[in-house]
Amino acid sequence: MRFATYTTAGNQYYGAVADDGMIPLSPNFPRWTTLRNVIENDGLHALAKAAQGRTATHHDVTYDIPVPNPEKIICVGVNFPDRNAEYKDGQEAPPNMSLFPRFPRSFTGHNQPVIRPPESEKLDYEGEIAIVIGKGGRRIAEADAYDHIAALTLCNEGTIRDWVRHAKFNVTQGKNWDASGAMGPWIVPFTHAAQLDDIRLTTHVNSELRQDDRTSRMLFPIRRQIAYISTFTTLVPGDIIVTGTPTGAGARFDPPKFLKPGDVVEVAAEGIGTLRSEVIDDT
């Protein structure tokens, strides 16, 4: 079962994804305005039950980011061995993970344009798996971390490369341009460890394979990410952790392969789906 947030005829809904459209579920649950409210109330099972036996009635839809207005989006940087080696600084993997925040406005939905701003032509792609927190907590033990995940989705964590180097150690301004990345298409409920422990993650640009790795090779596994992040901040339902990108981003080619208008980026992961974005220039 897959659940999405989408807009049709000027109204936003959440619902179950069918092969030919959407099964609207938000009208059945007026007490839960958004998928974030559903997750806060452990309601994904109720949604799945309500969708059984129904067919799609919304066919012309626009995908929005799956979980509207999360309190926090926290991204993990340099989280694959080859990605660490790209920096060519001679350093082994650090003892702790690099983190930075992203704002919801910096993401757009599946099949929606990713925007290259006029201030820079160095828009890059980063394909990643994102987890949605279902049960909040502070100082969560690694052994218990998976119990706190509600669902999985995908992310093209678009980056304006020259703007991440505007300051000595701050990447935030290069990571938060409006609609510079994408998230979706939907969320897949997380029910067992095999959905995360060793799955393939790929990124294609114009059908060319650029990134290809497996979650089992992460320097900081997702269990550790949840434990580490929850040490310094309380995780709440609907929070999103973007778990890291493999080697192969455009900046690491010689010459670099930055995105340009008309390029199509597809991020895919086993058991989750494919997130598609086309690049346009800001107008």
Image (spheres, helix red, strand yellow):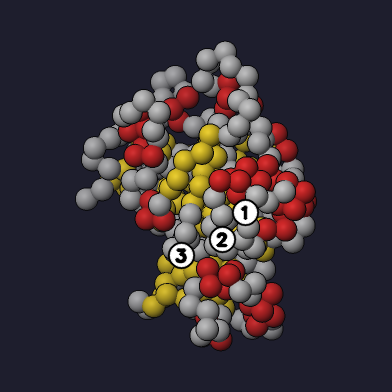
The tag on residue 138 is 1
Residue at the disc numbered 2: 236
State the separation of the CA atoms marked 1 and 2: 9 Å
Give residue 46's quadrant in the image: bottom right
Give residue 29's quadrant in the image: bottom right
Identify which amino acid the numbered label 3 is placed on. Answer: Pro
Q: In the rendered view, tell whether residue 157 sits above or below residue 138.
A: above
Asked if the residues shown at circle 3 and circle 1 are in contact, with their CB atoms under 8 angstroms apart, the answer is no
Task: Nearest to the eye among marks 3 and 2: give it.
Answer: 2
Name the side, left or right, on which 277 lies relative to 84.
left
Q: Residue at x 51, y 47 (%)?
A: 74
Mark 1 residue element: loop
State the separation of the CA atoms marked 3 and 2: 14 Å
The answer, for residue 135, to whether it is visible in the render is yes
Identify which amino acid the numbered label 1 is placed on. Answer: Arg
Quadrant for the N terminus, please.
Answer: bottom right
Q: Residue at x 49, y 69 (%)?
A: 5
Where residue 178 sits in the image (x, y, percent)?
33, 50
| Of pointers 3 and 1, the one earlier in the residue sequence | 3
The answer, for residue 204, to whether it is visible in the render is no
Give residue 198's quadrant in the image: top right
Q: Residue at x 61, y 60 (%)?
A: 136
| Label 3 environment density (alpha carbons within 10 Å; few <14, some 14–19, many ≥20) | some
Where residue 232 sits in the image (x, y, percent)?
56, 46
State the separation of the CA atoms marked 3 and 1: 23 Å
Asked if the residues shown at circle 1 and circle 2 are in contact, with their CB atoms under 8 angstroms apart, the answer is no
Residue at the disc numbered 3: 68
Mark 3 residue element: loop
Name the side, left or right, on which 19 lies relative to 182.
right
Residues 170 and 262: in front is 170
The tag on residue 190 is none
